[in-house]
Image (cartoon, rainbow, N blue to C red):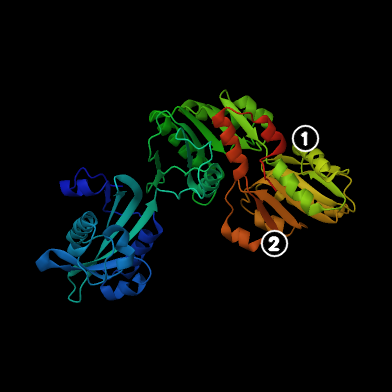
């Protein structure tokens, strides 16, 4: 955003950023500016041009020049977070929130003075605490005579505060432990905090118009044991690299603020697939990520079902904790499979050890033999090849197990091979459901009866709706909460790795 260095002092006191060539980030402000631009005729749109679009969002004020005031024409509800309880027809001078009214009046004056839209950002403070980041747009409107005398406005509010826990804190809950959750991991973080009887700590995340990020804690962390939950999967508008940078900056801010210990909890850890050189001059991304986390001062890293546990543990010089969600998957599948003959198949040779350990665990739960199989796979320049299949799957329900489902191609190939060799039912099981790129297409045409993943990665609602009945998502909040409780209290993780969390399905 434009610096305030050249603006008048009263604007500097009211706003943190001012942009006279707006590029809004929030959905509400972006929609309002797009509508203003498309309806602009001459100097500015009129009320008649924009009023139909303000029924559900945005607001409009008319200037009252003789009183140096503005009157709400439409959108009192949309502006209530800034002004308080106001009605259409009221003036800014009558608003309960005086500071909010001053902000609007000053911004409206500026928009009418320059004859162009103006965008500002500021922090909303309630009871002495930062509660939300606000992006506020004001764009001039023309009256019937063509003169500028009204303003179109819109506001995007990003709340920093999170809900309180659903139940009272158990003996573990104390004031020395703090849990944050970043980005789309917030829902998972809230579930983890509830399991511990804690409130998720508030923080600010702000995106600038060039996609740079600002992230900071909104409570004191000095001498605290801090846990930051952030899965590093890529999603629309947030790549794995974006999330990694945000996590690094946040850990750095926590260390600068005096946190006694900071644990990065990355249920899904990105860049873990490139853990060794398979071709000359290859990068070893897992080790580089480790060096970055160590460099900003993380004391510990926790993840779930690392792509290669040995490589993960060897990459870090800080304490590394590789949790295992296989117990959750095995308990669920043991219940679903019932008395059917079963086989566990690895979709590639690299995951054969993982599949074998899972087969043994499932065999123990079912108290009967479980067959196994594997698929050959070669990947080069993004292309997958290899058609060799070996295993006893004829007449059996098959569980194809991997640590993650990304494009779906590997799993789809294995599913087709299992069906061709006589499998009666095919279930895909993976800890991390990334479902990237063309995964939906690849899996839709494959002979798959059910897909079981965990919520280490937040699932897109549209995908969950389309795959309703086929996609099952198991929760890892109890697993993470118990791990955090043991780490905070100096307990052992070994039993948790063996049995999974108490009360798991």
Secondary structure beneath dot 1 equals helix
Instruction: Give the percent coordinates (x, y) of residue 377.
Output: 77, 41
Viewer-proximal residue among 283 and 369: 369
* Nearest to N terminus: mark 1 or mark 2: 1
Is residue 267 visible to the viewer in this orientation of the structure?
A: no
* Residue at image location 69% in from the left, 61% down from the top: 469
Instruction: Give the percent coordinates (x, y) of residue 478.
Output: 61, 43
Q: Which of the 4 image quadrants contains residue 483?
A: top right
Instruction: Give the percent coordinates (x, y) of residue 493.
Output: 64, 31
The residues tagged by marks 1 and 2 sit, at their Cα atoms, a distance apart of 30 Å
Which-is-in-front pick, marks 1 and 2?
Answer: 2
Instruction: Give the percent coordinates (x, y) of residue 172.
Output: 53, 36
> Which residue was labeled with disc 1?
353
> Which residue was labeled with disc 2?
469
Viewer-proximal residue among 128 and 403: 128
Label 2 Cα crowd, 10 Å radius (few <14 / some 14-19 / many 20+): few
């Amino acid at each position: 955003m434009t610096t305030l260095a050249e603006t008048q002092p009263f604007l500097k006191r009211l706003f943190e950023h001012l942009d006279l060539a707006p590029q809004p980030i929030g959905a509400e402000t972006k929609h309002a500016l797009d509508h203003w631009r498309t309806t602009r005729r001459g100097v500015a749109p009129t009320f008649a041009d924009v009023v139909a679009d303000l029924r559900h969002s945005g607001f409009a004020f008319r200037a009252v020049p003789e009183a140096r005031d503005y009157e709400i024409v439409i959108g009192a509800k949309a502006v209530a977070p800034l002004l308080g309880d106001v009605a259409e027809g009221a003036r800014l001078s009558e608003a309960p929130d005086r500071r909010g009214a001053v902000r609007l009046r000053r911004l409206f004056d500026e928009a009418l003075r320059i004859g162009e839209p103006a965008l500002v950002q500021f922090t909303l403070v309630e009871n002495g605490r930062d509660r939300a980041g606000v992006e506020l747009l004001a764009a001039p409107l023309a009256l019937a005579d063509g003169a500028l005398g009204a303003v179109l406005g819109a506001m995007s509010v990003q709340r920093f505060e999170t809900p309180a826990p659903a139940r009272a804190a158990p003996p573990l809950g104390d004031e020395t432990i703090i849990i944050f959750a970043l980005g789309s991991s917030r829902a998972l973080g809230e579930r983890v905090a509830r399991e511990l009887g804690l409130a998720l700590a508030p923080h600010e995340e702000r995106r600038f118009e060039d996609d740079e990020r600002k992230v900071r804690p909104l409570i004191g962390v000095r001498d605290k044991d801090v846990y930051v939950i952030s899965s590093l999967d890529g999603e629309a508008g947030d790549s794995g690299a974006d999330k990694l940078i945000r996590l690094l900056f946040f850990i750095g801010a926590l260390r600068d603020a005096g946190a006694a210990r900071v644990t990065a909890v990355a249920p899904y850890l990105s860049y873990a697939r490139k853990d060794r050189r398979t071709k000359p001059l290859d990068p070893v991304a897992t080790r580089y990520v480790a060096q970055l986390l160590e460099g900003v001062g993380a004391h510990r890293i926790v993840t779930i079902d690392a792509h290669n546990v040995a490589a993960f543990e060897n990459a870090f010089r800080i304490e590394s904790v590789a949790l295992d969600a296989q117990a959750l998957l095995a308990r669920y599948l043991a219940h679903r499979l019932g008395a059917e003959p079963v086989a566990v198949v690895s979709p590639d040779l690299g995951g054969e050890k993982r599949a074998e350990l899972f087969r043994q665990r499932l065999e123990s739960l079912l108290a009967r033999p479980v067959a196994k199989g594997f698929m050959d796979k070669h990947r080069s320049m993004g292309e997958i090849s290899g058609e060799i299949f070996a295993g006893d799957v004829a007449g059996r329900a098959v569980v194809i197990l991997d640590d993650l489902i990304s494009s779906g191609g590997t799993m789809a190939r294995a599913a087709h091979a299992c069906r061709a060799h006589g499998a009666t039912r095919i279930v895909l099981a993976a800890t991390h459901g990334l479902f990237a790129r063309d995964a939906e297409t690849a899996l839709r045409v494959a002979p798959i009866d059910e897909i079981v993943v965990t919520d280490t990665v937040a699932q897109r609602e549209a995908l969950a709706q389309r795959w309703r009945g086929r996609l099952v998502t198991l929760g890892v909040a109890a697993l993470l909460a118990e791990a955090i409780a043991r780490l905070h209290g100096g307990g052992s993780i070994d039993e948790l790795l063996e049995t999974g969390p108490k009360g798991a399905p």
